[in-house]
Image (cartoon, rainbow, N blue to C red):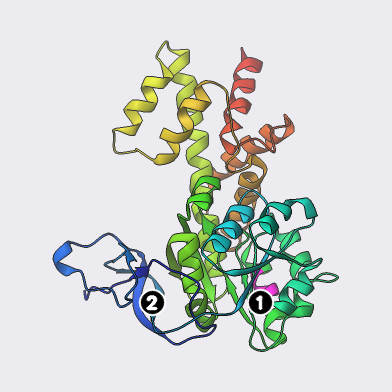
Amino acid sequence: MTPTFLVNPNANCSYNFLSSTVMASCSTFCPRIPNNFRVPPISSFPSKPLLSLSFKAFSCQASDASSQDKFSGQVGFLGLGIMGSPMAQNLIKAGCDVTVWNRTKNKCDPLISLGAKYRSSPEEVAANCDVTFAMLADPESAIDVACGKNGALSGMGPGKGYVDISTVDGATSKMINGHIKATGALFLEAPVSGSKKPAEDGQLIFLTAGDRSLYDSVAPLLDILGKSRFYLGEVGNGAAMKLVVNMIMGSMMASFSEGLLLSKKVGLDPNVLVEVVAQGAISAPMYSVKGPSMVKSQYPTAFPLKHQQKDLRLALGLAESVSQSTPIAAAANELYKVAKSYGLSDEDFSAVIEALKAKSHDSA
């Protein structure tokens, strides 16, 4: 197998919209390669160390923009919730010309104070920007903001791009893509893997699909917002990848919750369990970060439980569409639904442990 490489530059906003790029092939499985295989960065900017060896698991492409290009376009950002707000802040702090909109205007104020412009509708944002990002809570919101009354669609046209970073199902993404493309504009789905802290730190993972030229053009912006990016081909593939990732995550959290409660029930210290897990083969940052708070029954919101359950629901729908059995995810989904019924929707998804506590109490 021939190794291929991905260089992920330390991006800034000095790149032309729809600029030419230097491209390299990669796949979805990209382990770090030894130093002796590394190639010099194409860009003269300092690069983030993301050189990758690819295996043919699923075809994707990655690109690096030339340092000769200059980006002087305007960037729109729709949706300033728990994820959108820190992402927009990072673009502003990097020197980008950002215009924002949110249903609740006061969420725009901190960004305006940092230098962002404000428009009163998604249509106005799209009309005044070269590329518009959208980070919405669910498929219904994504459709409404893109295609509804005064939606971004009305402000799109040739030479513009729409990047939907919301977590939605493939059908929703394809529908929005069709409407955007009909205006002559370009479309990219780019859901992210990562929650509040990675969004704040610019450490998200982008799972993109759609117009390759738009991907190449916004790559410098994605590099401001994230630590890595994958191009997965046709629209729908990015949404599918994100749903599979979040299905795994939701199931992992449910199982971890069971382990914490069982360890305590048999007289073990759950804090020690967290340490043991952290040092073993099943170690995951999620366990180390959330475990200590879960032991204390504290669930500071990084990823709302209602969104985790929504993603499980969408993932189960995806599985059903291809006749793939997912009994573990289905069981986890029911547990998150119980947690929602207890009023935990806006708590972190780790609060699913409370549903298990209630079940144990009821069966006692």
Report whether 193 appears left or right of 56.
right
Q: Earlier in the sequence, mark 1 or mark 2?
A: 2
Which amino acid, mark 2?
Asp
Which residue appears farthest toward the right when viewing the image?
Answer: 149
Image x and y of residue 33, in percent: 22, 62
61 above or below 110? Answer: below
Q: To which quarter of the image does residue 78 belong?
A: bottom right
Q: Is residue 232 something one can see in this rendering?
A: no
Instruction: Give me the residue at 48% from left, 86% from top.
Output: 19
- Residue 174 in the magenta stretch? The answer is yes
Quarter of the figure with the N terminus: bottom left
Residue 111 versus residue 33: which sits nearer the camera?
111
Q: Is residue 41 something one can see in this rendering?
A: yes
Q: Which residue is mark 2?
A: 64
Residue 145 versus residue 91: which sits nearer the camera?
91
Q: Residues within 10 Å of mark 1 (few under 14, many from 20)?
A: many
Image x and y of residue 306, in percent: 67, 43
Q: Which residues are magenta?
A: 173-177
Quarter of the figure with the C terminus: top right
Which amino acid, mark 1?
Asn
Residue 91 versus residue 60: which sits nearer the camera?
91
Q: Nearer the viewer, mark 1 or mark 2?
A: 2
Report whether 210 appears left or right of 175.
left
The dominant secondary structure in magenta is helix
- Residue 266 in the magenta stretch? The answer is no
Labels 1 and 2 touching (C-beta < 8 A): no
Q: To which quarter of the image does residue 123 belong?
A: bottom right
Q: Which residue is mark 1?
A: 177
Residue 226 versus residue 241: which sits nearer the camera?
226
Instruction: Give me the residue at 39% from left, 84% from top.
Output: 68
Image x and y of residue 262, in percent: 46, 20
Q: To which quarter of the image does residue 180 belong?
A: bottom right
